[in-house]
Image (cartoon, rainbow, N blue to C red):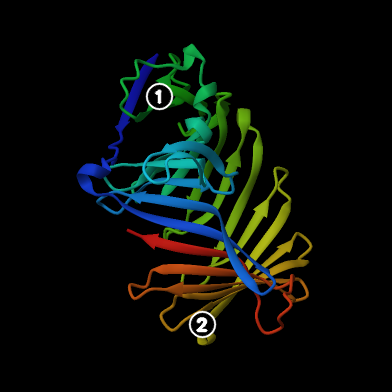
Amino acid sequence: MFVFLIRYKIFVLFFLSTLFGLKTITIKVYHVFESFGTETQELKYSTTMTFDTKGMMIDSTIYGHNIPLTKKYVYMTGEDEGLKLQRTYDKEVILSYQFEYDDLKRKVSTTLYGINDSLYWKEYYKYNDNSLMYKKIRYDPEKAINPEMVVGENDGEMIWAEQYIYNKEGTGFEHKELYDNYILTITSYLFDSLKTPIKNKEYFDPSVIFQTIFFHNQNGKKTHEVTTGRLGSTLGSKKYEYDILNRKTKEIIYNERGIIEKIYNTVFDDESYVFYDYYSDSLVNFSAIKETRLDSKGRTYIEAILDGQEKLLEKSVFYYDEKERIIEIKKYDMIRKTSSKDYNIPIRVHTYEYN
């Protein structure tokens, strides 16, 4: 039996903000209300994205702000000596994404944490020689507990490896994929008469949530993807089509039985700086239409959502600063009208803050 092990080191681009001055972008989501002619904005959520000195996002944390007021009594000295009631708004971490990159600035992993730093899942990405992603695998590290799947000692350095084990007869081999020294998948191959390896069977560790394989055309555009779930069960697939300018014009979603579930068509009107996304089911019944209008600089200016009868449901308006960065998005609910016919209160306002 012959064993070949190929190891791939991943260089993590984490830096301490106090030493390297990390940059952040904070997106705040407000819900806007109108009562007796007075407009109020209530902060609901915020997302803070942190970037390293090379411009790579290394963290994205979502906070919830609609938490009851904290009441605390403090003792004050001086003219107002005595117990005073302090009230402050709290915020709590809802989700936190952490990203890692290799020396080519390619994202190689994403880790999702919840409340109290609870670990939800970890995701790895693999690339071909043209730096196109061809595989994504997500698993739950808390369930990766089979000692038989551990290879070597984990010294804290994040690596992934591929192990090829050929049988004594020379009729085939096993391909094992390791992540942080833990084997997540094992694929068996047999050689045909031309010595071409043919997949025989595949094993997924119970900790694997899903695995997606991506395929690309000669222009580097993704043409289709296939996803398998726990223990290798089929979850479905997607197919993509493009125009002569390499712009995506169609996305077809298939379920686990290979039947079309949804179709997304995109039509471009280059003269009017607008394009349309049509969402339909397998019977080509239009369920929604998204109309995106661009400004003279090619930036998104207005996004409108219409139903199958082209009735306006939602509208989003984008605003930019002098550096062409998004500073605000106002999202209007066109169904819920206000008392004023000439002014619609936005249901959500997204503000962007750059440090």
Q: Is residue 198 above or below residue 46?
A: above
User: How crowded is the residue under tag 2: few (<14 C-alpha within 10 Å), some, or many (20+)?
Assistant: some
The x and y percentages for residue 295 are: 47, 81
Residue 141 drawn at (x, y percent): 49, 26
For residue 180, say whether it is visible. Answer: yes
Circle 2 or circle 1, nearest the eye: 2
Other-residue count near label 1 (Cα within 10 Å), few / some / many at <14 / 14–19 / ≥20: some
Is 12 left, or right, of 92 in this rendering? left
Mark 1 lies on a secondary structure that is strand
Residue 124 visible in image: no
- According to the picture, the residue beneath numbered tag 2 turns out to be 273
Q: Which residue is mark 1?
A: 164
Relative placement, left or right, of 130 versus 96 is: left
- Which kind of residue does numbered mark 2 sit on? Tyr
Give the residue furthest to the left. Answer: 19
Disc with the residue nearer the chain's start (2 vs 1):
1
Above or below, comparing residue 316 to residue 180 in the picture: below
Q: Which residue appears at 23% of the width and 43% of the height? A: 18
* Nearer to us in this view, 320 or 13: 320
Is mark 2 in CB contact (under 8 Å) with mark 1?
Answer: no
Q: Residue 267, relative to residue 254: is it above or below? A: below
Please tell me whether residue 295 is drawn above or below residue 120 in the rendered image: below
* Residue type at tag 1: Tyr
Q: Nearer the viewer, residue 308 or 237?
A: 308
Q: Nearer the viewer, residue 92 or 6?
A: 92
Spatial CA distance of label 2 from label 1 is 52 Å
